Image: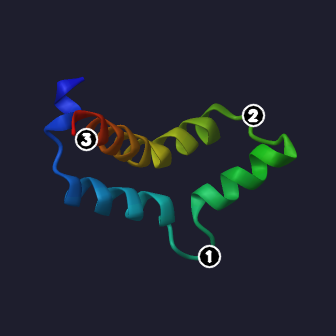
Amino acid sequence: MKWIDKIPLLPLGLASIFMVGAPFMPEPHLVEKAGMLMAGELTKAIDIFDLFWHLTPVTLLIIRLSRMKKSK
């Protein structure tokens, strides 16, 4: 997992912010998908893929920051 340590923080942070909010209007996908998940309506493969797609940069950022903290 050393390749994660090579990802620059600024682009990863910007990608995370963008993917969490995209599309910005009328409602971010993550808000929509979280509502679907809570209602038990997240059953289509495309919706599940979309949820993971939008969470990937955030997950990488969390892993990257936790690895930075452990190495100090």
Answer with left or right where residue 8 lies relative to residue 54: left
The answer to which quarter of the image holds residue 64 is: top left
Q: Residue 26 carries which label?
A: 1
Label 3: element kind = helix
Q: Position of residue 10 (x, y in %)?
A: 21, 60
Q: Label 3 belongs to which residue?
A: 68
The residue furthest bottom is 25
Give whichever of discs 1 and 3 has the lower sequence position.
Answer: 1
Q: Which secondary structure, mark 2?
A: loop
Instruction: Look at the image and tell me in which quarter the N terminus lies.
Output: top left
The structure residue drawn at horizontal position 63% and vertical position 31%, both measured from the top left corner, is 45
> Toward the viewer: 29 or 20?
20
Kindly identify which residue carries mark 2. 43
Label 3 crowding class (10 Å Cα cut-off): few <14, some 14-19, many 20+?
A: few
Give the amino acid at mark 2.
Thr
> Residue at position x 54%, y 44% from top?
50
